[in-house]
Image: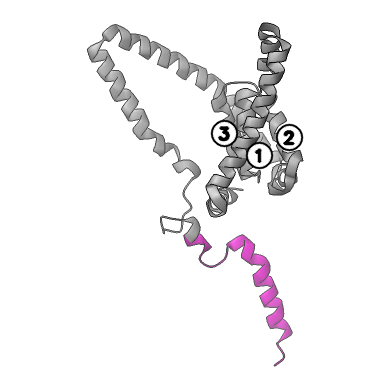
Amino acid sequence: MATSPVRDIREEQRRQEQPKQGRPGSERAQCPSGNGKTPPPGGGWKSGLPAFGVALALLGALFFLNPAQGREVARLWKESTYTVLGLLPPVFLLLGLFDSWVSRERIIPLLGEGSGIRGGVLATLLGALAAGPLYLSFPIAEVMLVKGASLRNVFVFVGAWSTMKIPMFLFEVGSLGGRFAVVRYAVSLVGIVLIAKGTELFLGKEERRLLLARYETEA
């Protein structure tokens, strides 16, 4: 039996809108809580409250058992807090500009699933040319995921940030010798690639799909 042209047009519109709305049942798959809301990646800032409470309890116990050592720990904690507060605001400002000015469509070909070797090289360069402590790479990695970067390239980026920074390499050349620096750099590169690929395989396709789906809702 022939179908109506109007009905065919409506069916085509439904198929085009389905990727935006999600397939039936996908919302339940992405929302383990079952309330229709996608939980924030990593559990949000509230997930860190138990650890913060435990740290405060340990600090209080240390003050009680050894007041001098407790004051020293509190002093170091205060200095570290000031350092973090001095570094994070500029990073978040730059990430906000990046999120606003760079579209997801431009990042996916460069760092997405189909970027191949070029994506891995770019992720390595981004991490190696970075400056600052490792914890600054985590908010950047989250924005990369929101923009469509693959998990493998994000793992490579974080690994390169931690062990392949150019200033670290130059310091090793001057203090430990060029041969040692080059060998260490090459071994670090191979290790980062293997760890990134192994972690991706360990997660499995379904786990990766659910994880990336969380960030796609923020894009």
Tag 2 secondary structure: helix
Q: Does 63 sit above or below residue 217?
A: above
Residue 146 is situated, as x and y percent measured from the top left of the image, at: 61, 44
**Distance from Cα at disc 2 to Cα at disc 1:** 9 Å
Who's the residue at 53% across and 47% down the image? 203
Residue 106 visible here = no
Indicate the amino acid at tag 3: Pro
**Distance from Cα at disc 1 to Cα at disc 3:** 15 Å
Q: Which residues are magenta?
A: 1-28
Report the residue marked by disc 3: 139
Tag 1 secondary structure: helix
Q: Residues within 10 Å of mark 3 (few under 14, many from 20)?
A: some
Quadrant occupied by the N terminus: bottom right
Indicate the amino acid at tag 1: Asn
Q: State whether the magenta stretch is mostly helix, strand or loop.
A: helix
Q: Which mark is residue 122?
A: 2
Residue 163 is situated, as x and y percent measured from the top left of the image, at: 62, 23
Q: Which mark is residue 153?
A: 1
**Image quadrant in which you'd find residue 143:** top right
